[in-house]
Structures are given as structure tokens and as C-alpha cells.
Image (spheres, rainbow, N blue to C red):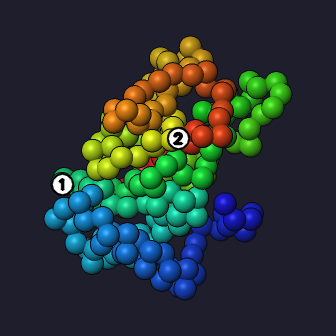
Amino acid sequence: MKGTDYYKRTLSTSECEVLFGTLKARFEKNMHRHTGIEWAKVQTRLEANPEKLWSLDAMEITVGEPDVVGQDETTGVYIFYDCSAESPKRRSLCYDRAALDARKEFKPANSVVDMAAAMGIELLSEEEYRALQNLGKFDQKTSNWVKTPANIRKLGGAIFCDRRYDTVFMYHNGADSYYAARGFRGSLRV
């Protein structure tokens, strides 16, 4: 991510224009991800929620390639997921702050839970991750931490997913582990 000034959480008019152009182009290129949704309505919703633009930009900067993957029929909220072919460039992170603090040596720079919170996004759940995989083939060379149920986390573990052999797999690992090919995918509701 950019330097410390990046955490100002606002985008300039020109930064917004660039982001809208990028998002619109991706939206139009991948219509199968959001059948029946119109870009003009998505942009109107984004313009009414400028604080969400900062989070989308953070997803974009870390090469998450955010795109609309659905709309909540009850609230009208649009749902964005990281849609990059492989794990976004937020890798080599343990699962959460407790796992990071527990490491005695070779600590990673951050945890996925802390980084997602700083970006204003949510980690995908296993269910959301599997839904994303219905929209394409993602993470055929990388893997991603997903929201871990409290009972697993309480015992020191965390879960992650990937796609191999044309199948989506869920695995477990110690929450304090981290790997160069494991990151996380986020979601944002606007």
C-alpha cells in the first residue's frame, strides 16, 4: 500500500475519476459476474458513499481487482469481491493479531484480520469464497485465508481455501503461519 499518508481515507477528484474508469472497464468486461446490474446505478451508489471509494481503491492498489458480484435484493446494496485471478498482493500474513503476537521470531508484517480492518473490508467466508469460484477459476496457484469460525480459532487454527484440480478445497493451518503464496480476498458492501 502507499505510504502513511494513504490512510487519510479520502480520494481526490482525479483519483476518483481514475478509480471509476478502472471499475467500469472491469465491470463491462466481466458482465457474467453481475447479470442484470447496471453500472450507472452502481456508480450512483458509490458517489453517495465516498468513504467506500477509499476501500475500493485500497483493494485496487493491492491488485485485488474488485468487481461487483451481486446485489442484496432486500437492501439494494451492491457487493464487491476481490476478483484477481490469483491472491491479491497482500500475502505473507498470519491470520489475526493474537497469532501475530504469539510468534516469537520471524513475525510477518501484519495479519489478514488487521489489514482487512485497516482497508475497511471484510474477509471472505468459506461460503463467499465458494460463491466467487462459481464466477471463474481463481487461486489455481495461490491460496487465501477465509473467515475462521471461533471454535477453530480458539484452538489455535485458521482456515484457508484454494482451487486445485478444478475443485475448491478448504484446509487448516496454525493461525500464526504465513506463506508467500497465501493472502486474503475481501468483500465490500456499498
- Residue under the image location 46 percent in, 55 percent down: 84
Separation of marks 2 and 1 at Cα, in angstroms: 32 Å
Vertical order, 91 against 169 (above or below): below
Tally of marks: 2
Which mark is first along the chain, 1 or 2?
A: 1
From the viewer's perspective, tell me whether residue 89 is left or right of residue 168: right
Q: Quarter-wise, where is residue 32 in the image? A: bottom left
* Residue closer to the observer: 18 or 47: 18
The amino acid at mark 2 is Thr
x and y, in percent, of residue 8 in the image: 65, 68
* Label 2: few (<14), some (14–19) or many (≥20) C-alpha neighbours in 10 Å: many
The residue sitting at the front extreme is 165
Query: Which quarter of the rendering shows the C terminus?
Result: bottom left
- Residue under the image location 66 percent in, 60 percent down: 1
Instruction: From the image, tell me which residue sits under label 1.
Output: 73
Q: Quarter-wise, where is residue 183 in the image? A: top right
Q: Is residue 139 visible?
A: yes
Vertical order, 2 against 157 (above or below): below
Vertical order, 42 against 80 (above or below): below
The residue sitting at the right extreme is 105
- Residue under the image location 49 percent in, 18 percent down: 152
x and y, in percent, of residue 54 in the image: 53, 67
Q: Give the secondary structure at mark 2.
A: loop
From the viewer's perspective, tell me whether residue 161 is left or right of residue 174: left
Give me the disc on residue 142.
2
x and y, in percent, of residue 110 in the image: 69, 42
Q: Give the secondary structure at mark 1.
A: loop
Q: Nearer the viewer, mark 2 or mark 1?
A: 2
Q: Is residue 117 visible?
A: no
- Residue under the image location 41 percent in, 34 percent down: 164
The amino acid at mark 1 is Glu
